[in-house]
């Protein structure tokens, strides 16, 4: 039987040394809540703040011996419930492991600790003309370890994909008797190391191993960028423009979409100096400086064929001045404002979905989501990464209304059903966590792959024989 | 600050209740990276206020977090919920000083590293 709360805290202090364990309930509760409104039913016994892989090993050995769960956390911004502790145990917060250990431009990698924030890494890389391209909306606070575990994506996913495409190697610690520490993968882009355990851990939501450090691929910053924003009266026309951009052989750097309601809200928030009315398509292409004119003309021609109004930004400065990207980035606060207005109260909860469908099915997906929302009585707002078919429909709910919360759960399932029906997936980049376990099952069954769940459970047992790492998540 | 609210507690409770725990405020905070944990940053301080108003008490680690806030307001433009974070910290300090929230008389401030 696992020892009591106080005993766990004192064992940890003994093993890790002073100052790395906090058990005061006020503080522990700060690590027991996620933006999706989930809160631990009981506060964890303690929060551990490792300062290196050795501390993670000491924690893992102790957890194995005394059989208490470990809940790893970055900045707790996943939106899937994957970082919330579900029962007694210990939260391990990676915030003190925040060093960039090495940047090699010649070898195109950055070696970083798990607690490094993505924006901080990018600020450092930008000084040398490089970037790490995975940019979740929460990049200002999201950590590398959190992004690895959630398999994060972002706006640049249209061109650069998600974390699984940018993690070369991982240094991990297992929750076994020895607290095994190992380096998986390589520092090189080409790497054949038997089964690809790195990509198994990417997106595993802390259920397989504790991620201590990562070798991340990096790439040069674009030399120049052209951005076009089109405002459309009809969704079909907007999607036709998407098809045309893609069929003309243009590979956008960013390709984003806001529905007309999201545009109205974001414009009220940002107040851009443009006529923002209708649904918005935002297309950015990274180009050589010499090609700026040509791409500006091409994008204006493609979007202008169907949009009511098109704006072109020929540089980052111009894009900032027009506030177009800022509109897309302000979707989250705009949604909060909207929920407050609809519900008539200040304390609201945002429920944000994360489905993906093949881009050719986006019109059907948007229609399906709107129908389901109307049927369940929700005022839905839709935005997303249209370049890779990833939509983030969202609704606002009153956290003090249990009947509404139950309806919201039904909405969540219905939206996932729309994605599965169109050959898509229930989670593109936020993860399964606690909120989408049923959705995962639904998707696998639809693909005739229910056995995959058994295989996943067997993998989980091989990595984490006592089931101590982030229990209750994914499976 | 208090506007139409009947009391400081009521205003603080309403303000803290707006927090959705997104953490966007933390990127701007000058004290978080120097402190030992989240209580030294705005998301932590807002949540501490929420808990203190529920329970009527605040522990030493939390007290140190609340009193290390510089009230610089760098977090305010980052907050999607529009919370007056420095105002909330001031309110909590006032509630502690007047004994309406119980807390130790002093607590050590811990610096990372």
Image (spheres, rainbow, N blue to C red):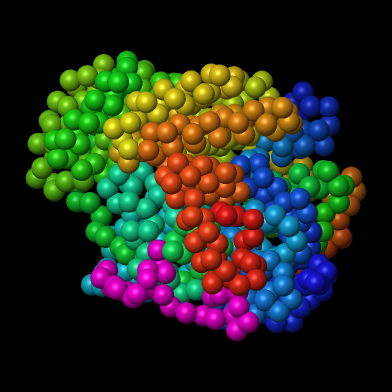
Could you say which is closer to the camera, residue B25 or residue A185?
A185
Question: Quadrant location of the C terminus of chain A?
Answer: bottom right
Q: Quadrant of residue B66?
A: bottom right
Query: What residue sits 12% from the left and 30% below the top?
Result: A297
Image coordinates of residue B77 in percent, x first then y, are: 53, 39
Q: Position of residue A470 (x, y in %)?
A: 62, 61
Q: Is residue A23 within the magenta segment?
A: no
Indicate whether A159 appears above or below A243.
Answer: below
Which residue is at a point 36% across and 43% down the rendered structure image?
A155
Residue A180 magenta = yes
A99 relative position to A109: left or right: right
Q: Main secondary structure of the magenta part?
A: loop
Query: Is the residue A442 above or below the residue B31 in the image?
Result: above
In the image, residue A127 sits, relative to residue B84, either above or below, namely: below
Q: Which residues are magenta?
A: A173-199
Q: Residue at x 30, y 44 (%)?
A: A158
Asked whether, in this view, residue A392 is left or right of residue A83, the answer is left
Q: Of residues A120 and A446, which is closer to you in this image?
A: A446
- Between A384 and B88, the residue placed more toward the observer is A384
Q: Is residue A10 left or right of residue B20?
A: right
Q: Residue at x 42, y 69 (%)?
A: A197
Where residue A171 appears, as percent x and y from the top left, is 46, 74
């Amino acid at each position: 039987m696992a020892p009591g709360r106080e005993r766990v805290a004192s064992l940890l202090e003994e093993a890790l040394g002073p100052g790395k364990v906090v058990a005061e309930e006020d503080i522990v509760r700060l690590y027991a809540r996620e933006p999706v409104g989930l809160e631990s039913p009981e506060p964890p016994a303690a929060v551990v703040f490792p300062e290196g892989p050795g501390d993670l090993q000491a924690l893992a050995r102790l957890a194995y011996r005394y059989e208490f769960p470990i809940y790893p956390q970055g900045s707790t911004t996943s939106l899937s419930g994957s970082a919330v502790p579900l029962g007694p145990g210990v939260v391990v917060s990676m915030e003190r492991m925040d060093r960039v250990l090495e940047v090699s431009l010649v070898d195109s990698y950055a070696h970083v600790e798990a607690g490094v924030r993505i924006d901080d890494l990018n600020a450092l890389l930008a000084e040398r003309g490089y970037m790490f391209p995975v940019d979740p909306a929460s990049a200002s606070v999201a950590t590398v370890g959190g992004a690895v575990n959630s398999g994060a994506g972002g706006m640049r996913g249209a061109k650069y994909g998600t974390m699984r495409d940018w993690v070369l190697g991982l240094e991990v610690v297992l929750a076994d008797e020895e607290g095994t520490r190992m380096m998986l993968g390589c520092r090189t882009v080409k790497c054949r190391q038997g089964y690809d355990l790195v990509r198994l851990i990417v997106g595993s939501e802390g259920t397989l191993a504790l991620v201590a450090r990562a070798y991340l691929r990096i790439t040069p910053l674009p030399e120049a960028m052209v951005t076009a924003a089109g405002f459309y009266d009809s969704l079909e026309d907007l999607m036709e423009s998407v098809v045309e951009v893609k069929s003309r052989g243009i590979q956008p750097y960013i390709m984003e979409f806001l529905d007309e309601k999201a545009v109205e809200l974001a414009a009220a928030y940002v107040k851009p100096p443009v006529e923002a009315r209708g649904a918005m398509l935002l297309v950015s292409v990274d180009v050589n400086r010499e090609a700026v004119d040509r791409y500006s003309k091409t994008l204006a021609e493609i979007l202008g064929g169907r949009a009511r109004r098109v704006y072109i930004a020929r540089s980052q400065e111009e894009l900032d001045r027009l506030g177009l990207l800022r509109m897309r980035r302000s979707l989250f606060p705009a949604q909060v404002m909207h929920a407050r207005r609809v519900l008539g109260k200040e304390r609201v909860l945002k429920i944000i979905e994360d489905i993906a469908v093949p881009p050719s099915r986006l019109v059907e997906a948007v229609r399906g989501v709107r129908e389901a929302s109307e049927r369940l009585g929700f005022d839905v707002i839709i935005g997303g990464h249209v370049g890779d078919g990833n939509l983030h429909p969202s609704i606002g709910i009153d956290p003090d209304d249990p009947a509404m919360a139950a309806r919201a759960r039904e909405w969540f399932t219905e939206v996932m059903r729309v994605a599965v029906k169109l050959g898509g997936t229930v989670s593109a980049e936020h993860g399964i966590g606690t909120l989408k376990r049923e959705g995962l099952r639904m998707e696998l069954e639809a693909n005739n792959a229910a056995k995959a769940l058994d295989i996943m459970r067997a993998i989980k047992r091989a990595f984490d024989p006592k089931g101590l790492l982030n229990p209750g998540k994914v499976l | 600050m208090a506007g139409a609210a009947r009391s400081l507690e009521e205003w603080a409770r309403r303000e803290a209740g707006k927090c959705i725990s997104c953490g966007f405020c933390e990127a701007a905070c000058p004290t978080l990276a120097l402190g030992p944990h989240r209580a030294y940053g705005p998301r932590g301080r807002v949540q501490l206020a929420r808990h203190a108003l529920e329970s009527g008490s605040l522990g030493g680690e939390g007290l140190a977090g609340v009193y290390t806030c510089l009230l610089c307001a760098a977090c305010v433009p980052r907050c999607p919920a529009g919370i007056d974070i420095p105002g909330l910290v001031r309110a909590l300090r006032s509630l502690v000083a007047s004994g309406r929230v119980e807390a130790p008389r002093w607590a050590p401030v811990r610096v990372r590293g």
